[in-house]
Image: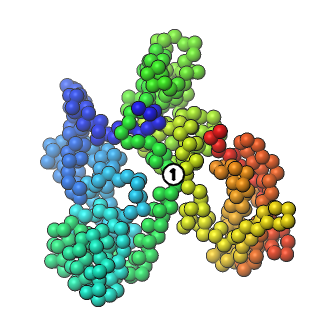
Amino acid sequence: MRFGTFAHSVIARVDKERATGMAGNDKAGEELTKHEQLLSYIRDLPIGTRISVRQMAKDRDVSEGTAYRALKEAGLAGYVSTKERIGTVRVGRKRRSHPEQLTFAEVLEIVQGSLLGGGGGLEKTLHKLVIGAMELDEMTGYIDAGSLLIVGNREGAHRIALAHGAGVLVTGGFGTSDDVKELADDRQLPILTCKHDTFTVASMINRAMYDRLIKRKIMMIADLVEPTAKVGSLKQSATVADFLKTSQETGYSRFPVVDEWNRVVGMVTSKDVVGWSPDQSVDKLMTRRPMTVTMNTPIASAAHRMVSEGIELLPVVDRQRKLAGAVSRAELLRAMQFANRPEQLGETFDALVWAGFSEERDADGRQSYTGLVTPQMSGALGTLSEGVLTMLMQQAAARTATELGRHEHIVENMTVYYLRTIPIDAQLSIQPHLIEASRRHLKLEVTAALQDGEVMAKAMLTAQTIDAS
């Protein structure tokens, strides 16, 4: 299988070990078996089941410490989720394919509300918001399965929503009747309540959905690795002979080195083992404390680190630094060719501010970007914020780099000279000028001036390009 892929999940490993009869005879082995059994038990619970450490320890005849460790590992594997005011609940493993879809449990957290009933449906996703500011007869045409009805103290609307497969969020701090709560429990559809008004709640949820959409358009390491394939690695006790054998079998010349708990402790390459005897252990030859990334690392960040440090392979680790996969520089650079450009992220602060600037060119073809300084761009003194000005100058430089065919780059250094304060409602022109360009680096000067030509700020910027060639 391909080397740069995600490791088997801990639950899958438990099933495999149980199928092959891996169990010890001493006390430690006995505890491991109990641990495996608890993980399997958690995995087989119905979605939406609440789990208590104390109750699980009592039902499964294990110590609370063993139950707690199993529950924590199941959480890392994505099989349970712990929410404030709700507790620990068995959930379906989430994928990054639709991260902009919120679950009812996440809505509950966003609005800082509480659960009235239907806790078994908290991990269901919602696809549409419906504001209940209409007559009941009209409301039925807008509500369908997977909707969330946002409404006040109208029990009739609560019943209609639940009958149509929708969840309910009661605003204004109101509750609902016991029979509506029973209906919610029966249909496993959440009915929530919060103290905010309807407009505030809708705004909070929409903002969260936009944030999810932005995250979806940023490619992460998790988009490159697969959750089912095996990762090549070597134990600390492995020898040069083991390295050569593994290299011949896989075709790769570098491997992460892991300890007995599968935590990454080093990297070893073919250069490291040259000239050593076959029985020499790799822990004496490896590079210790290697650079690593997580599943939530953006690929642009990982690629920049690999290019700047001359690294060919990055181990992917989880929160406990256990090996979860590995990704090569070639894989990252190929993926970046298909990554979305920043302007497609729409709702980021950078995109919203830059949207007011348009490109202009003079008779010699030199480009500049002109726009109005709006009140939203102001800082504490009522003038253009230094942070916003810096961002505008970076955006202008980025477009110059794009014109040169350097689509992916990372700013390495930027020195800004703020010469004068820029008032709001001023017409500002940002003028980038390329000073030097090499295969890997760019150097630019950027000038910020008012419409009459008065220079307000200057910046000197260097950037490193990330190119697959």
Considering the numbered disc 1 on the image, is that residue within a helix, a strand or a loop? loop
In this orientation, which residue lies closer to the viewer: 301 or 365?
A: 365
User: 292 above or below 345?
Assistant: above
Vertical side of 77 occupied by 330: above or below: above
- Against 63, residue 272 (above or below) is above
Tell me where residue 396 appears, x and y as whole percent: 72, 61
User: With 297 as the anchor, is 432 left or right in this view?
Assistant: right
Q: Give coordinates of residue 278: x percent, y percent.
A: 48, 12
Q: Is residue 306 left or right of residue 121?
A: right
Judge the density around disc 1: few (<14), some (14-19), many (≥20) Cα neighbours within 10 Å: some
Q: 90 left or right of 403?
A: left
Q: Nearer the viewer, residue 214 or 272?
A: 214
Location of residue 60 in the rendering, given as x and y in whole percent from the top left corner: 15, 44
Instruction: Please identify the quadrant where the N terminus is shown.
Output: top left
Tell me which corner region of the image, top left, top right, bottom left or bottom right, holds residue 11.
top left
Figure quadrant of the C terminus: top right
- Vertical placement of 33 versus 269: above or below? below
- Between 205 and 408, the residue placed more toward the observer is 408
Residue at screen point 26% across, 86% down? 136
Q: Is 67 left or right of 213, judged from the image as shown?
A: left
Can I make out residue 357 in this image?
yes
Count how many numbered circles sit on residues in the image. Answer: 1
Residue type marked 1: Met
Residue at 62% of width from left, 41% of height from top? 468
Which residue does the numbered mark 1 point to in the structure image? 219
Q: Position of residue 292 (x, y in %)?
A: 52, 39
Splitting the image into 4 quarters, where does residue 329 fall? top right
Give the colouring mode of the picture: rainbow
Residue at position x 74%, y 71% from top? 370
The residue furthest bottom is 135
Seen at 73% across and 45% down, the residue is 441
